Structures are given as C-alpha cells and as structure tokens.
Image (cartoon, rainbow, N blue to C red):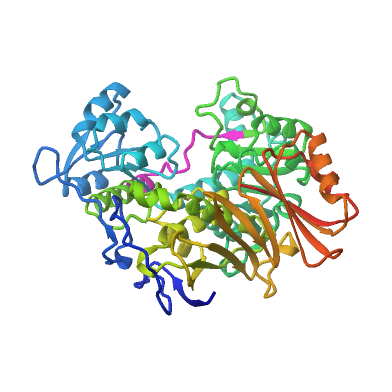
C-alpha cells in the first residue's frame, strides 16, 4: 500500500481546504450535505458535493424586516441597534405560556439569565425562531440540544462584562481583607469595635488566580498594582502572556499550598464542579482567604463552612452561589467571616450597555448570515453526512479529550497536529467538523466555551492553540471516510511518559471498527480498546499474570471491565495495558494498581 501526505496549518483566515499531493478515489458522489447554520465565510468550500448555506432570515409575514423579541431588560444602546435592523418587541416579565404564544411570531429572541428557553419554546416557534441571544456569558437557561435540533443558533456576549467582573473581584478582595462589610454593619448597629475588625494588608501577599482567562488576567493586573505577588493555574494559559504581566503559572496543588488569597475565575464544568472541597481545603495554607466571582458550583458550600469553622479558611467573599438566591438561613451566607453580594459581577452601567451592544451585534450578524464567533451550539448537518461521520466525530472528540488529559498540569497546550489517513479524495471529505471536535475535546473539559463547527478555529486562535492538519492518502477502497485519526500535542510535558512519541509529542491514534471508536495507539505502543466509559493506561514489565492481577483489583472494587488490550515492544520487555472501565475507580483502587511491583506508571483517563 502506498501513501501520499500533505499538511496545512489551520487558522481563522485560512482560505484553502486540506490539501493532498494526489487524489485517487472511485467513490461516487455523496448526496448534497446542507449545513443550515453559519460556516466560516473566509473558508467557504465550493465543491459540487458540499453546499453550505448561511443563516438568512425573511420575516414570516412576508415583510422585509425580521422580528426580534427582547424578553428581559436590555441596555438602550443595544435596543437602538436592533431597531435599525428589525421590528423589536420588548416584552418583559412574561410567563412561560406568554413566551410560548408570542415566539411563533419571532425570528430571534434575546434573554438574560431569568428566562428559561426550553424545548417547548423551540417547539412553539414552529421553525421560525432562527437565533437565541443570551445577554451575558452563562447559557444554563437555554436548552442547547433542543436549539440545535430545531436549527436555531445560540449566541452569547462573553466579553463585555470582563472589566466589571474583575473590578468586583478586587472590590471583594479588599473589602474582605479590611472587614468593610462587617464593620459597616457594626457601626450602623450603634457599635464602635475598632479592635474586633483589624484586617490584613494585601502588599506582599500571594494571590492565586484559578482560571487565567479574560477576567482572571484583569484581576491579576490589578492585584499586581496593589503590590501582591500573583500566581495562576490554568492548563491553557499561554506562559508568555502570564510572564508579560509578571504572573507565574503553577500547578493546581502548588497554587493551593502557596496562596494567601485565592480568586476563582474558572467555569463550572463536570471537571470543576465542587473542585474546592474538604480534600482541597485541607491542602491550603491555614488562614487562606477566598474570593469567588465565577460560578457558585465550583465550591462545595458545606465544605467551605467546615473549613471556616476549622480556621483553615480565614474569610470568604462570594458573589455567586450554587443556588441563587441562596436560602435566607444559609449557614454560609450568615457566617460572620463571609462577605456576600447578590451576583453583581457584571452589574455596572458600562457593562450592561456593553453586553447589550455585544449581543445585539451578534444577533443581527447571525440573522444577516455572518460568522458568529460567539455561537455556543453545534450547527445542523444533513442526516446522510451525519450518519456516515457520526462514529468518526465521536472518535475525534475523544482523542482530543484523551490527549489533553495526558498533559502534565502547568504545561499549556499550544501545538496540535492532526493526521488523517483515508482513501478518499479531498472534496469527498471535509475535515472541518472533525477538526472542530478535536478542538472541542481539547478545550471544553475545563472551559465554559462551547466549541463547534462555527467557532472552533476562532476559539483555538483566541487560546493560542495552533492546530495543523496532515492528510495521508491511501490506495484502496474509499468505502470508509477514514482509516485512522492521529492527534499529537507538541512542546508539552506528559503525566504518562509512555504516551510520548519518539519525537517527544503526546500521541494518540484511533480508528472506527464496526461503527465503534477504538484507541489503537498510545505513544509508540499499539493497543486496541474501545473508547467507551473511561480508560486506565498502565506501563508494566511484560510478565505472566498481569492482566489477572489488575482485573482482580478492579473486580474486588466492583469496577466492570469492558475491554482490555496489551501492546508490547517485545516479549518480557515493556508493555502498555489499556483497560476500558464502565465506572470510575476509587482512589484506593487506583493506588492498589500503582503499587503492583511490575507497574512502572499508570494514568486514569475520563472520557
């Protein structure tokens, strides 16, 4: 079998599809694939087999202007911008029934956090609703899967409130350190207790910024101006950007152990849910002070109360809570050493106007069929194309998730190389969706960015992620779209040394077998394990009984093994055991595996 290869670096401004040196395919043309949402205008493909249609909007009543329903208070500047493009209906405080009745007459809907946009809204729109705009960052109140199913684009406004949130974080930091809220309440109660409210200075203290995105960066800048030493933890933060403002990137555990103050700026994801808990509080310096203007769910609130009572945490300042508003008798809210505000991070006049303009521009642009860089849901793809690509789409995302989990904390991902092997000609296989899913797998686990075909390249560029693609053209039957997908992460440290290729990159490879995604290579080791559930990778000395030993430990812990594969260099040499498990093993179970004498290293990877 012979192969030809070519590569191209992908960026938002790229104009050419993936290239190959030669084309050889006897495949008959696929049925036309219609993507009903926004493609990348600067990368439009004009092959006869792929027809991309931009979102366009004609009012349902036949008039030239679309109708936009604004369901919650929006800044005047944003409303004026909308009125220059569409018929605008500002109807606030609607009941769900009223919204469902009105939505069938609207082409776009703009909400804040107080309006729930569930499946029934999309069903009631009868296909007319094209865009939902969330005036703010979080989209917890919008049913993304239903929006995608009904062909509706969802956009948000993630940047306009950055400065406001950062300023509020600094305000809470300073007021907490100097007991401003408590002493204010004391004086207003007729007391004068100067000795009780002695605070601490910020100068020379270490602030750990957990999440070094837009808000975290701005908090760091301001904290540096207050004379604080600033460290940060964020797996995706570019080291050069951090160093440029005098910030040192450290591991999660080092940040906890070193900080006098901790400021949270991470999104709420399955990976960050209750990330501050009894175990992590125990790792902190005694007397640490915590600020949270991010998401309430990242803190286990009961554990925080215990840490406050035990003196591990000296004070906390919270703008967000797991449930909002919190209960009036909440032990956390009522705690004497906790300062609270009612989710005011974005509540400045300037931020509200900025959010209004940002969401108005996003909605108008989407209705005009322009690129929506802030799109947060996946575009609709024709059933024929989706059916064929579905297992490869799943494979692509899971390879991305596996690869990024193999990276050691603190070494940010910058360079990604993706290689495809296929017998199909270039115009028979558009890899943008696969590339988007790899980007999704790498970025989404610890980010609040929703990656899809619309925003994948934009999101990667914003995070300093350089992704290049290589196509290896195979001779043979083009029955399957792809033979293999390989993902390599360059210039990173690995928590599992065996995942490094000969040239030093974290490398994973997979293929689809009988419709099921499989992991087929880790570093230089051949394996074969289905990408279902989660995976344990062990590097071991190749000797009899290892499969039974590991299997017995998992069985004793009631962890079901769905697949097991061993790849080795040579008999009685090093080998990699890949074990697919349905459940997440306990720390004790994983510790037992690590204590097996023949196991040289191991890692648990959650899919």
Q: Is residue 158 visible?
A: no
Query: Whole-percent x and y of residue 270?
Result: 59, 41
Query: Whole-percent x and y of residue 224?
Result: 60, 60
Residue 27 within the segment the image draws in magenta: no
- What residue is rendered at 66% in x and 29% in y? 336
Rendered position, 396 above or below 503:
above
Left or right of 105? Residue 512 is right
Query: Whole-percent x and y of residue 32?
Result: 28, 55
> Which residue sits furthest top?
329
Left or right of 287? Residue 414 is left
Quadrant in the picture for residue 599? bottom right
Residue 349 within the segment the image draws in magenta: yes
- What residue is rendered at 62% in x and 59% in y? 403
Left or right of 235? Residue 90 is left
Q: Which residues are magenta?
A: 339-353
Q: 565 and 325: which one is in front? A: 565
Query: Whole-percent x and y of residue 166?
Result: 51, 50
Q: 470 and 59: which one is in front? A: 470
- What residue is rendered at 41% in x and 71% in y? 18
Rendered position, 51 above or below 378:
below
Q: 500 and 284: which one is in front? A: 500
Rendered position, 327 above or below 218:
above
């Amino acid at each position: 079998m012979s192969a030809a290869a070519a590569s191209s670096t992908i960026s938002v401004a790229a104009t050419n599809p993936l290239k190959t040196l030669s084309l050889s395919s006897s495949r008959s043309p696929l049925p036309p694939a219609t993507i009903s949402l926004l493609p990348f205008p600067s990368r439009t493909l004009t092959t006869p087999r792929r027809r991309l249609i931009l979102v366009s909007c004609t009012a349902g009543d036949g008039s030239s202007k679309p109708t936009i329903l604004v369901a919650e208070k929006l800044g005047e500047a944003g409303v004026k911008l909308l009125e220059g493009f569409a018929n605008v209906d500002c109807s606030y405080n609607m009941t769900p029934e009223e919204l469902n009745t009105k939505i069938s007459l609207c082409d776009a809907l703009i909400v804040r956090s107080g309006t729930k946009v569930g499946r029934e809204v999309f069903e009631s729109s009868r296909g007319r609703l094209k865009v939902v705009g969330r005036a703010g960052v979080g989209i917890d109140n919008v049913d993304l899967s239903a929006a995608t199913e009904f062909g509706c684009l969802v956009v948000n406004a993630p940047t306009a409130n950055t400065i406001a949130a950062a300023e509020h974080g600094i305000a809470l930091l300073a007021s907490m350190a100097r007991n401003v809220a408590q002493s204010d309440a004391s004086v207003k109660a007729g007391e004068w207790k100067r000795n009780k409210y002695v605070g601490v200075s910020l100068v020379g203290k270490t602030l750990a910024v957990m999440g070094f995105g837009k808000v975290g960066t701005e908090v760091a800048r301001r904290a540096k101006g207050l004379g604080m030493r600033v460290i940060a933890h964020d797996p995706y933060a570019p080291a050069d950007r951090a160093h440029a403002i005098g910030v040192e990137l450290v591991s999660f555990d080092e940040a906890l152990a070193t900080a006098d103050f901790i400021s949270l700026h991470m999104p709420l994801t399955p990976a960050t849910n209750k990330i501050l808990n009894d175990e992590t509080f125990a790792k902190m310096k005694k007397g640490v002070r915590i600020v949270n203007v991010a998401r309430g769910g990242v803190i286990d609130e009961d554990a925080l109360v215990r840490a406050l009572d035990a003196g591990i945490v000296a004070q906390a300042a919270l703008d967000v809570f797991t449930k909002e508003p919190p209960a009036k008798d909440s032990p956390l809210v009522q705690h004497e050493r906790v300062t609270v505000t009612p989710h005011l991070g974005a509540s400045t006049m300037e931020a509200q106007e900025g959010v209004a303009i940002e969401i108005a521009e996003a909605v108008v642009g989407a209705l005009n069929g322009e690129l929506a860089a802030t799109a947060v849901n996946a575009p609709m793809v024709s059933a024929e194309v989706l059916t064929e690509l579905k297992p490869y789409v799943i494979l692509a995302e899971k390879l991305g998730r596996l690869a990024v989990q193999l990276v050691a904390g603190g070494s940010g991902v910058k360079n990604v190389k993706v290689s495809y092997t296929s017998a199909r000609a270039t115009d028979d296989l558009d890899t943008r969706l696969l590339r988007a899913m790899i980007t999704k797998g790498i970025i989404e686990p610890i980010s609040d960015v929703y990656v899809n075909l619309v925003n994948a390249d934009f999101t990667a560029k914003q995070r300093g992620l350089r992704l290049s693609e290589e196509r290896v053209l195979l001779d043979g039957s083009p029955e399957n779209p792809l033979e293999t997908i390989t993902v390599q992460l360059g210039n990173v440290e690995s928590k599992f040394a065996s995942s490094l290729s000969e040239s030093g990159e974290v490398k994973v490879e997979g293929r689809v077998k009988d419709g099921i995604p499989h992991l087929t290579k880790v570093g230089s080791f051949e394996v074969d394990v289905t990408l279902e559930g989660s995976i344990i990778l062990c590097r071991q000395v190749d000797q009899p009984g290892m499969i039974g030993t590991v299997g017995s430990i998992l069985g004793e812990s009631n962890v079901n093994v769905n697949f097991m594969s061993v790849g080795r260099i040579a008999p009685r040499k090093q080998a990699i055991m890949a074990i697919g498990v349905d459940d997440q093993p306990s720390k004790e179970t994983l510790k037992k595996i690590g204590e097996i004498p023949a196991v040289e290293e191991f890692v648990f990877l959650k899919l």
